[in-house]
Structure formats: structure tokens, C-alpha cells
Image: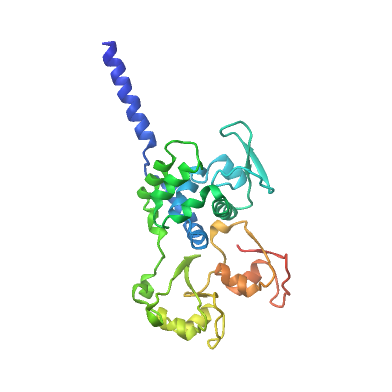
Amino acid sequence: MRRYIFLIFGLFFAFAEASAQQAVWNQRFQDYFDTYKDVAIEQMLKYHIPASITLAQGVLESGAGRSELTRKANNHFGIKCHGWTGRKSYHDDDELGECFRAYDSAYESYQDHSVFLTSSQRYSNLFRLKQTDYKGWAKGLKACGYATSPTYATRLIEIIELYKLYRYDTEHHVDKYQLEQVRHQGGIRRQVHEFNNNYYIVARKGDTFRSVADDVDVSYRKLAKFNERDKNDVLEEGEIVWLQKKRRKAPKEYKGLIHLIENGESMYSISQKYGIRLKNLYKMNHLDPDFTIRVGYQLRLR
């Protein structure tokens, strides 16, 4: 009899352990992904880290944004100090009272996560993988020692597949603009990026609003208006061209983020960078249109 009791308990605990490790859909995770997908995609475009990996790590490390470390320090990725000279927060982890990096906003945490991975030799082999190889990235992060949990890679993969986060790892296209048919001279495809509930392309050398309009099937006059420019302007290489009217403020995940003006920037270039209407950027910072921009000045984005 005792043998059967032990067998039943063994089966129960084995089932409980398997269930605990299996990803189960819940609304808190989905809300987290809806909130941070734009910034994860932005980081992918800059640093070539799959957005799916960033989102899965973020939701796992932060408890969907509800962990004590995330609430008190805006640290979404559990990154410890490791020579960090910024603000710090102390929490129990593998040891008591460990030092973790603290940020002023979630966006800063996402940005530092990208820098942390790209600047460390430990993770350099990951960047040889394809941007769409989320399984390779998940296993590579575990192998490189990002986390101590033996199921870390499996959990990342389960989350990515359950919530279909892999769809964020490819260049976004907009059905409205029929991008699958949009071509430039010589058959080179225009890449359309998504940010701040809007879409943009990056200008090439010699571009004008007319040449961009030919590719995206939007009136060049409308494009100029969306970007607060004259319709006859010649665009500079690398310049952002928004395909819809810019928003009144930055995405909600940028709440609390301050933009520190750098040399060579203008109020207009900053408004273009974040997809914010120029007049709204002035208004939210209580500035007059004749304000003289200066290096080091801090701008609110929401």
C-alpha cells in the first residue's frame, strides 16, 4: 500500500513540476507585450537583437513589470551593477542584498539591455545568429550565463511561441501601403519601420518627397505635410520620413524619459526622431517657437 502511495505522490509532483514550467497564456503577459513591443522593435533595428527575445526576457525577468526590482528601479532585465556608475538598487537574488542597475524609465532599461549585450565579449557569438533565430538566441543566452535557471532557454522559447512574439523579428510592413509590391529603382525594396503607432522609411541619398511618394503610394504633398516640411525639399540621406501624421507625444512606455539635447540636434530633428509633432514638442516643454536650442537642455517627450 505504501508503495502505491509513494507512486501516486511521485506522479503528482512530477505533473506539478511540468505544469509549473509550461508557459500558460495570461493577460498580464499580453499587456506587457502590447506596452513594450514598439521599443523592443526599435532596439532590434538599432542593435539586431530579436525583439521576441527582448520581450520574452523582459516579461520573465520583470514578472510582467510587477517585480519589486522593476517597480522600484525600472530594471526589466535583472541586470546587476557590474561596474555600473549610475543609480543603484539592492535586492536579494542569488545572494542577499545584491547590487542592481536602476533607471529613470523603462525605456532606459531596454536601451541598456541592448548596450549590455552588444558591448560584452561574452555575448558576441549571439550576433552571428540570424535575427529570426529566436531558439538559437534563447539557448545562447543560457549557455553564455545570462541566467542560472536550467530551464531559462526553454521558458523563453515557450513564451515566444505561445504569444507569437517571433512575428516582431521580421521587418514590418503595412498592408495599407502594399509594401510587398513597393519597389525602388533597380528593384531594391523600401524598408518600412514601425514606431509610436506610426510608420516611417529612412531617406536615401538624393531622395525627395516625390521619389518617396512614388514608392509608398502616398501624395508627396501629404508626406511633406506629415513631416512638417516644404513639398519641394531635398531630403538628407538617413533622414526619417513619416508616412502618417506624427503623434502628439512619444509612446506611453517613454513616460518619464528625458531627452538630453546633443550637439547638432534641433527641435525639429528631435521631433522627427520620436515621431512627435513639432508644435506639441514645444508645448509639452512650455517653450516658445523662438526658443534657442542648446546642448545639455532636457526635453520631455510625454
Q: Given the current orientation, which residue lies at the most extreme bottom position? A: 232
Q: Quadrant of the C terminus?
A: bottom right
The residue that appears at 58% across and 41% down in the rendered structure is: 69
| Residue 281 in view of the camera | yes
Q: Is residue 106 above or below residue 224?
A: above
Q: How many marks?
A: 0
Residue 142 drawn at (x, y percent) = 46, 42
| Residue 28 in view of the camera | no
Residue 124 drawn at (x, y percent) = 51, 52
> Coloring scheme of the render?
rainbow
Residue 152 drawn at (x, y percent) = 44, 40
Horizontal side of residue 153 vs 102, given as left or right: left
Residue 109 drawn at (x, y percent) = 58, 51
Question: In the figure, residue 96 lies in which quadrant?
Answer: top right
The residue lying toward the viewer, choosing from 212 and 136, is: 136
Horizontal side of residue 287 vs 115, given as left or right: right
The residue lying toward the viewer, choosing from 163 and 3, is: 3
Q: Quadrant of the N terminus?
A: top left
Q: Given the current orientation, which residue lies at the most extreme top position? A: 1
The residue that appears at 31% across and 16% down in the rendered structure is: 6
Q: Is residue 124 above or below residue 292?
A: above
